[in-house]
Amino acid sequence: MMNEVDRIAEDCLDCGICVEDCEFLSSYCDSPRELAEKFQAGFFREEPMVPYSCNDCRLCQELCPEELDIGKMCRELRQELVKEGLGPLPGHRFVRKNQDFSASDSFTLAQPDPAQDKCERVFFPGCTLSGYSPSLTLKTYDYLRQKLPGTGIVLGCCGEQTLCLGDEARFQEVLAETLNMIKQLGTSEVIVTCPLCYKTFKAHAPELNLTFVTETLQGVGLPEGVKVNGQTFSLHDSCSARWEKGIQDSVRALVKETGHQIEEMEYSREKTRCCGLGGMVPFVNMELGGKITKRRVEEASHDILTYCASCREAFAPYKPAIHILDLIFNPDWKEDKAKAPKTGKARREEQAKLKTLLQEKFGKGQ
C-alpha cells in the first residue's frame, strides 16, 4: 500500500493552491511534491522539526484537486521518527506531561448518575474543557443530568496528544483506559465537548455512539433566561470538525437561540483555518504556531466565539474569545472573554479541581 509521502510525490499537481493557504507549507517548500521528495531522501531525519511543524488541520486536503493530505504524510513520518528513536522532540516533553496527567488517577474518574439505577449515556468533557473551566463543565453536566436522567460522567483523555506525536503504542494505552471506563458504566453513548475527541473517537472507537454537546443541547433545549439582546461574534470553526456539518449547524442554531449573532469568517466550515495549536506545533516551533494563530485572529472582525476550549485558549492572548458553553451557563462571560489562557500547571490544577468537585458532590466514583 502506497504511503502518503510516495502518493504526494507522485500525484501532486504543483498547482500551489494549498501552499497559498498554509503557513507551514509556505515556510518549507514551493509545493508538496518538493517537500515529499525531500522526505523520501531522508530530510525528515535530518530536520525532524519539519514534519512536527504541520498543524494537521486538513485544509490542504479540502483544497487539493487530488485530495492529498499533508497532515497524514507528516503523521506517518512522526511515527517513523518515534520508531527510530528520533521523536518525539525535546519540546514535546510538556505535551507528554499533560497527556500523562490526563490519564492518571489525579484526573480520571468514571461516575454514573447517582440519582439513577442505570447509566444511559456518559458526558465526556475531555481534558480541554475540564482544564479551561471546571465550573462551566460542572454546570453543563448538571443541566444534562436534569434534562437527560441517567447521564454519567467520565473524566479522561482520548489520547490524541500522544497519537499526534507519533507514539501509536502509548495512544492505544490511553484510549483503551478511557474506553474501559465508559464500558464499565454499561453504555456506549457518549456526549463529547471537544471536537478533537469527537474526531479521535470516531476514527478509532467506531463502537461508540457519539453526539457533540451542542447537538445534545439543541435537542433538549436551552435553560430559561438564556436569550438576550446579544452581540455579534466572529465564529471560529474547529478544524477537527471540518467536515462535521451536524456540529457546525448545531453551533449556529444555539447561538441564534441565545440571541447573539454570527459573522461568518471567510475561512469557515469545511474551509476553516487552524487556531495554531493543531499538531502540537507551538511546542517545537513557537514562531510558526504564533504566526498561524495571528493570521486567524486578524481574520476576525469581532470577538471570537469557539466551540473548542483549546481554540479559545489559543486566541485569548491576542483577542477577546469565549466558548459557546459560556454563553449558556456562565453569567460572567462578558468579563471572562478577556481572561488569560490556562496552560501547563494551571490547566492541570483545574482538571484536578473538577475531579474534586465531582467527588465532593457525588462520591468517589470508579
Image (tube, helix red, strand yellow):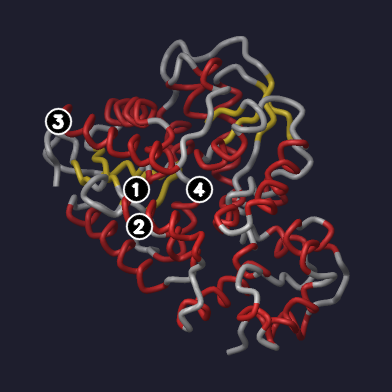
Q: Are marks 1 and 2 in contact (CB under 8 Å)?
A: yes
Q: Position of residue 332 (x, y in %)?
A: 48, 15
Q: For the residue carrying disc 2, how many other residues have a C-alpha within 10 Å: few (<14), some (14-19), or many (20+)?
A: some
Q: Position of residue 292 (x, y in %)?
A: 70, 48
Residue 260 versus residue 154 in the image, above or below? above
Evaluate whether residue 18 shows in this view: no
- Which image quadrant for residue 163? bottom left
- Which image quadrant for residue 294? top right
For label 1, the SS is: strand
Residue placed under numbered mark 3 in the picture: 115
Q: Are marks 2 and 3 in contact (CB under 8 Å)?
A: no
Evaluate whether residue 79 shows in this view: yes
Residue placed under numbered mark 4 in the picture: 195
Q: Type of residue at label 2?
A: Leu
Q: Answer with mark 1 or mark 2, whichever residue precedes in sequence.
A: 1
- Which image quadrant for residue 12? bottom right
Q: Type of residue at label 3?
A: Ala
Q: CA distance from mark 1 to mark 4?
A: 13 Å
> What residue occupies the far front of the structure in this picture?
90
For label 4, the SS is: helix
Q: CA distance from mark 3 to mark 1?
A: 19 Å
Residue placed under numbered mark 2 in the picture: 208
Q: Type of residue at label 4?
A: Pro
Q: Answer with mark 2 or mark 3, whichever residue precedes in sequence.
A: 3
Q: Position of residue 75 (x, y in %)?
A: 56, 71
Q: Which one is closest to the eye, mark 1 or mark 4?
A: 4
Q: Answer with mark 4 or mark 3, whichever residue precedes in sequence.
A: 3
In the displayed structure, does residue 140 sit left or right of residue 310? left
In the displayed structure, does residue 308 sit left or right of residue 345? right
Residue placed under numbered mark 1 in the picture: 190
Q: Position of residue 89 (x, y in %)?
A: 51, 67
> What residue occupies the far right of the structure in this picture?
15
